[in-house]
Image (cartoon, rainbow, N blue to C red):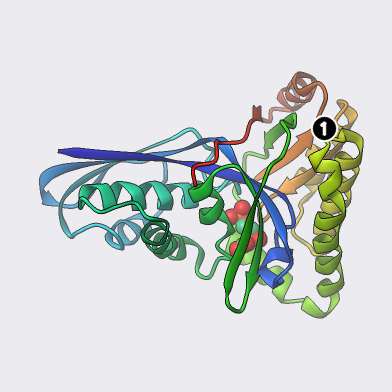
């Protein structure tokens, strides 16, 4: 017998890092993700194939699978470790497939509990935004509160978003620590990021590309100010804008990972990125699932 499940990755459109401190972030599930297949087989539970090369994988699997009897196959259409929610997509797909395997209903609570247990293996104490948006699909506003996360699905028009991969991984935990290490100075920047999400929502909802682009570039400058950008990420932002993007920003924790750019002519941005040796592709929202 075998069971399988897919879950999408995500991009944070605005508000990463600020979300750790209770500000609202905006994230969107994308049309790329992770598929997990679980096969019943004799012997210890084992990873049969995986695009993720991480020593914590065994621990992650054992959060939701028995010690024996399961062969795990993982396939990905996401770049791994680039701030596109690959570990969260893995966590949600694994949660869903493991519930199916046990004949249990994939209720929101059950998927959430298992996915968060897996996410914590990789990210320690994440805000939860990644696996929440992966579970629900579409776009959402997300805020962390003392009483738990508050999220609100939001309808966005189709936006011409290009993802440019810097080719290097950022370490989310290190980046979160960098910000925490200088919080007295960073608090004001983080609050500005939170405000920027709120003030940009009307432009996002009417697909006002110049206004959204300006806000993304402003968000990038704020991320630079808190120390999570790199010269390479800044160069990608500049290249995208020179190729006609109305704005661009790093997306995710920074230190590496991806840049998102908003462009009327996505192909022009992809070509400019390719000329520098950076992989680039357009993304669309993943359909809402719940
Ligand atoms: O998972 P990443 O690398 O896309 O970044 C997560 C976003 C942060 O706000 C930096 C951390 C978090 O837990 O929300």
Q: What residue is drawn where x is 66% and y is 68%?
A: 20
Percent position (x, y) of residue 104? 25, 54
Above or below — where is 290 with respect to 196? above
Picture coordinates of residue 253, whole percent (x, y): 66, 56
Mark 1, secondary structure of its residue: helix
Res 156 quadrant in image: top right
Which residue matches tag 1? 240
Which residue is rendered at x = 78% and y = 25% of the image? 269
Q: Quadrant of residue 65?
A: bottom left
Q: Quadrant of residue 17?
A: bottom right
User: Where residue 224 sits: x, y (%)?
Assistant: 83, 57
Question: For the view shown, which residue lies furthest in the left direction?
Answer: 42
- Residue at x-position 61% and y-position 79%: 146
Asked whether residue 280 appears in the rendered view, the answer is no
Location of ligand 1 given as a quarter of the image: bottom right
Q: Is disc 1's CB within 8 Å of ligand 1? A: no
Q: Is residue 244 above or below residue 227?
A: above
- Asked if residue 77 lies left or right of residue 185, the reply is left
User: Label 1 crowding class (10 Å Cα cut-off): few <14, some 14-19, many 20+?
Assistant: many
Relative to 35, does residue 65 appear above or below in the rendering?
below
User: Residue 85 vs residue 183: left or right?
Assistant: left
């Amino acid at each position: 017998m075998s069971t399988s499940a897919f879950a999408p990755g995500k991009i944070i459109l605005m508000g990463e890092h600020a979300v750790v401190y209770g500000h609202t972030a905006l994230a969107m599930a994308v049309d790329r993700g992770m598929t997990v297949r679980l096969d019943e087989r004799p012997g210890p539970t084992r990873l049969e194939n995986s695009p993720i090369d991480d020593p914590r994988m065994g621990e992650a699997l054992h959060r939701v699978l028995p010690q024996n009897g399961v062969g795990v196959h993982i396939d990905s259409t996401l770049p791994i470790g680039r701030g596109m929610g690959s570990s969260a997509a893995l966590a949600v797909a694994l949660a869903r497939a493991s519930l199916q395997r046990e004949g249990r209903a994939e209720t929101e609570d059950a998927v959430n509990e298992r996915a968060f247990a897996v996410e914590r293996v990789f990210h320690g104490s994440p805000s939860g935004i990644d696996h929440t948006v992966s579970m629900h699909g579409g776009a959402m506003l997300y805020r962390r509160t003392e009483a738990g996360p508050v999220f609100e699905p939001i309808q966005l028009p189709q936006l011409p978003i290009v993802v440019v991969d810097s080719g290097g991984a950022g370490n989310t935990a290190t980046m979160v620590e960098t910000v925490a290490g200088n919080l007295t100075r960073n608090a004001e920047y983080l609050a500005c990021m939170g405000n920027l999400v709120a003030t940009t929502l009307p432009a996002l909802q009417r697909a006002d590309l110049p206004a959204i682009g300006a806000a993304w570039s402003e968000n990038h400058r704020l991320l630079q100010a808190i120390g999570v950008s790199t010269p390479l990420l800044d160069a990608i932002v500049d290249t995208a804008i020179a190729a006609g993007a109305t704005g661009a920003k790093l997306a995710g924790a920074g230190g590496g990972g991806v840049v998102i750019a908003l462009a009327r002519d996505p192909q022009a941005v992809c070509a400019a990125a390719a000329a520098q040796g950076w992989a680039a592709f357009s993304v669309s929202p993943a359909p809402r699932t719940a």
